Amino acid sequence: MKYFSLNKKSPDVNFREATIKGQAPDRGLYFPEYIPSVNKEMIIDIESISNEELCYQVIRPYVGDSIPDVVLKDIVAQTINFPVPLVSVDENIYALEMFHGNTLAFKDIGARFMSRCLGYFVKGNNKKITVLVATSGDTGGAVADGFLGVEGVQVVILYPSGKVSLVQEKQLTTLGNNVFAIEVNGTFDDCQKMVKNAFADHELVKSIFLTSANSINVARWLPQQFFYYLAYKQWNHKNEAPVISIPSGNFGNICAGLLAMKSGLPIKHFIAACNANDIVPQFMNSHLYQPKQSVATISNAMDVGDPSNFVRILALFNNNAIELADYFSAVSISDEETKQAIIDVENTTGYLMDPHGAVGYIALKKYLENNNNTYGIFAETAHPIKFYDVVEPVINKKIALPPSIASIMGKEKIAIKMEPDYFLLKEYLLSVG
Ligand SMILES: *Cc1c(COP(=O)(O)O)cnc(C)c1O
């Protein structure tokens, strides 16, 4: 399998190079040269196949000869080391719980897969590879945990001091080993700027082996397809394909779902559930893509004003917005509606949603009201405890700490404090690289 840049001004690369580079030299996103069709028999017999074998078969064509079969099987098994249950919430609504990984958000799948691929690619190198990321919360935790203990790789994570939740900070700063946290006395944008400066610094990238782990990396994007196959494996209404609603920010997760659908997985329709950051819902109305400054909401992992993976979604549909609209719709949900849904669903069913999942739930509910006799799935992308500061006041009770979180809350935070100055970061990277 070859990958080309969506900007079409860079040479094609294989999976290995696309993973190491992250982004093409022309700043385009890498995209597979063709979409493999999934084996039809496998879909018919899906309930009898193990999760490991199913996911391995899905990813195999994308990896090509970059990783041998035995190694790839092992990487896939380590990636999906947690359950992805499909839970009945309402009469015709199910939640796909993507959050049972170590950091309690769906990003664990992409981070675990990418870290292990990269670990394999740098084997035997005498130079360590440094993964540099800026985080506003969820990404950093998943990346830190995914790369923990992977040989030949070290992770440097920048986060804005006082602007991530306590749970998120603990997840970033208590791992130790090959994971280094930098607490920046500034905003997320300052962190992002420092990271961008590092990648643009020719002198630095000549002396240390630097890569990113952001959500555009093919090794983070592609394994997210697993969620959709695992959902279909548990789907009870096989005579009718599901409608799936995905809380979306950078649109990586939903783009992976659309890719699975294009490969032949039976899915009727996708709904991109957005918060007030409504660039894609606006695009679906006007066919004009107009990035904006992001606005802060209670589903803050989706506060994105220029969703990076949307170009991949357009590419999947030949850049034809009308063709796309047959399989994809997008809707913007307010914070008020989100809070009300968390309360209502908890009251009537006992099911507690996090703010992101709640956005997905409302978007699905609205769609089903206009489309009778349809069943739907919404993604629960994070455990509600990760957003306890939003959820607890809304439902007016405490959420019990899951054991994995309870154990890190007592651990000591280790972070390097830094002013938002690129030269301090450079000095640090040269000292550890
Ligand atoms: C990252 C994140 C999202 C958005 O996912 P994208 O792939 O960027 O669209 C949604 N919910 C949670 C909890 C997240 O952490």
Image (cartoon, helix red, strand yellow):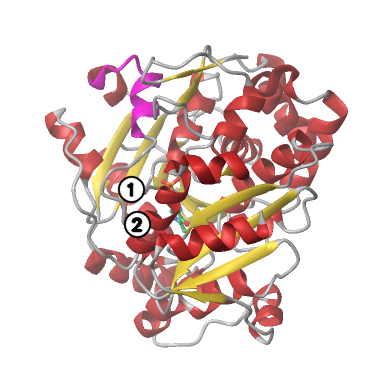
Q: What residue span does the magenta drawing correspond to?
A: 310-321
- Total numbered badges shown on the rendered structure: 2
**Most distant residue in the front direction:** 203
In the rendered structure, find residue 359 and report the number of the disc placed on it: 2
Residue 320 highlighted magenta (yes or no): yes
- For the point 38% across and 68% down, the residue is 420
Q: Nearer the viewer, residue 112 or 162?
A: 162
Q: Look at label 2 and name its amino acid.
A: Val
Q: Which image quarter holds the N terminus?
A: top right
| SS majority, magenta | helix
Q: Are marks 2 and 1 in contact (CB under 8 Å)?
A: yes
Relative placement, left or right, of 41 versus 318 is: right
Q: Earlier in the sequence, mark 2 or mark 1?
A: 1
Relative placement, left or right, of 5 versus 114 is: left
Residue 53 highlighted magenta (yes or no): no
Rendering coords of residue 172 (x, y %): 59, 69
Around disc 2, counting alpha carbons within 10 Å, would you say few (fewer than 14), some (14 to 19), or many (20 or more)? many
